[in-house]
Amino acid sequence: MELTKLHIVNYKNYGEVHCDFHRHFNLITGLNGKGKTNLIDAIYYLGLTRSYFNHSDTHNFKHDTDFMRIAGNFVSGKKKVSIAAKIKKKSPKVFEKNKKKYEKLADHIGLIPTVMIAPKDQQLIYEGSEERRRFIDSTISQLDSTYLQHLIEYNYVLRQRNQLLKDYGKNRSLDLSLLDIYDKSLVEHGNYIHAKRTEMILEMTPVFHEMYSKISGNSEVCDIQYKSKLTDQPFAELLLESREKDKILQRTSTGVHKDDIKFFNEENMIRYVGSQGQQKSFILALKLSQYEILHLRQNEKPIILLDDIFDKLDGNRVMHLISLLKDIDIGQVFITDTELNRLRLIFEELKYDFSLFEVKDDNVHIISLKDKEE
């Protein structure tokens, strides 16, 4: 998958900007706060229908505006497709493919496979299980539209069940027949979600091991494991057993919304024993595993977005990572950095073709500094 042109209007700090991109490596430089990350986040938005950094659009509009638009022209093999996102405050989000509006945003997920690697990914290690579930759900959803629909339906029923339990807390009256209906629906959707998450972790684990070995130089062994109560006990039984507890808590205390992905260094949790370098390598291996799975399953090279990679790695490790990207036959890559010459020197030393851009002039213009065509 290749993004050839990008047009942004009123997205975050951008008023309006047009960009044409290189088919392989695009290096985006500029001072902190000028909009490098916002530029590649706009690309992510076109792939996943939302920002990687702000899940609500409330903070994505340029100051004092109530409308934003992101549009891109993509090429996959000999096929060309245009995607446009049109968002107005207090109105439903609109996505269009070749000027035809999607009936459901979910129908778009997976068309533009996309992987983002950013400093905030450290949250996968340090934050709660929600971040790790979001990672695995994003991966599967780009491959399986049925999974995404089950996930949407599960979360909808979960909200309904939780509201029923909150109402019970207020009036001490519980409609057991309605609770049974919610439980039956949760089981249907939850079992599908659990099965697909289990399959994905089994498929991703050997790919992750290979990637981590390449990045770390075979220096240690790390692992990922899926933890879910549904692995050991039927979901229907879990819900029935937890009813009294749920009535007290006024929320659903068991289900796939409580699952977690555990990260290990040898036999210990990497968040407690892993060095900073090990944790950075772990995240890179995890995201490159995501890339490989999407590539293999879709027979399509995802767009990969690398935000501020010098925050993650020193110069030598960055060069090693870029060489690895070339070795695994990566597709189109976007890389941001604060220093104009730092990435350029690495790519010139490696003799890779690239385009170099600088974000400046009141956060509005992208200035092409170098454009090498194959």
Image (cartoon, rainbow, N blue to C red):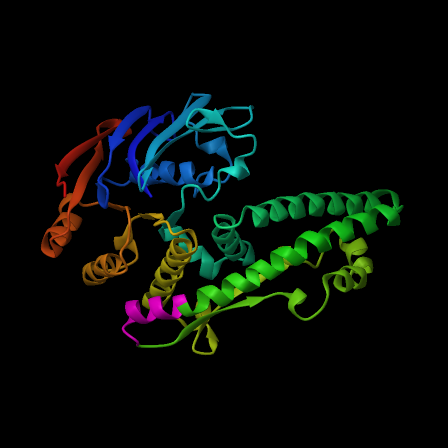
Residue at point 21%, 40% (across, down): 22
Residue reaching furthest right?
Answer: 173
Count the numbered circles shown. 0
Report the magenta residues as a range.
207-218
Q: Which percent across, then down, holds residue 323?
A: 21, 60
Residue 33 in view (yes/no) = no
Is 144 situated left or right of 248 in this image? Answer: left
Q: Nearer the viewer, residue 172 or 372?
A: 372
Q: Quadrant of the N terminus?
A: top left
**Where is residue 166 drawn, in percent x and y?**
78, 45
User: Do we see residue 272 in this rendering?
Assistant: yes
Q: Residue at x 41, y 36 (%)?
A: 46
Observer-nearest of 20 and 116: 20
Q: Quadrant of residue 338?
A: top left
x, y percent for residue 268: 47, 76
Closer to us: 248 or 359: 359
Residue 294 on image: x %, y % = 41, 53
Is 85 placed above or below 304 here? above
Nearest the viewer among 88 and 277 is 88
What residue is drawn where x is 55% and y is 54%? 130
Quarter of the picture holding the C terminus: top left
Give the overall secondary structure of the magenta segment: helix
Where 176 falls versus 10 (above or below)? below
Does 200 lie within the magenta span? Answer: no
Question: Extreme front residue here?
Answer: 78
In the picture provided, is 163 more to the left or to the right than 124? right
In the rendered image, residue 215 lying in the magenta stretch gets the answer: yes
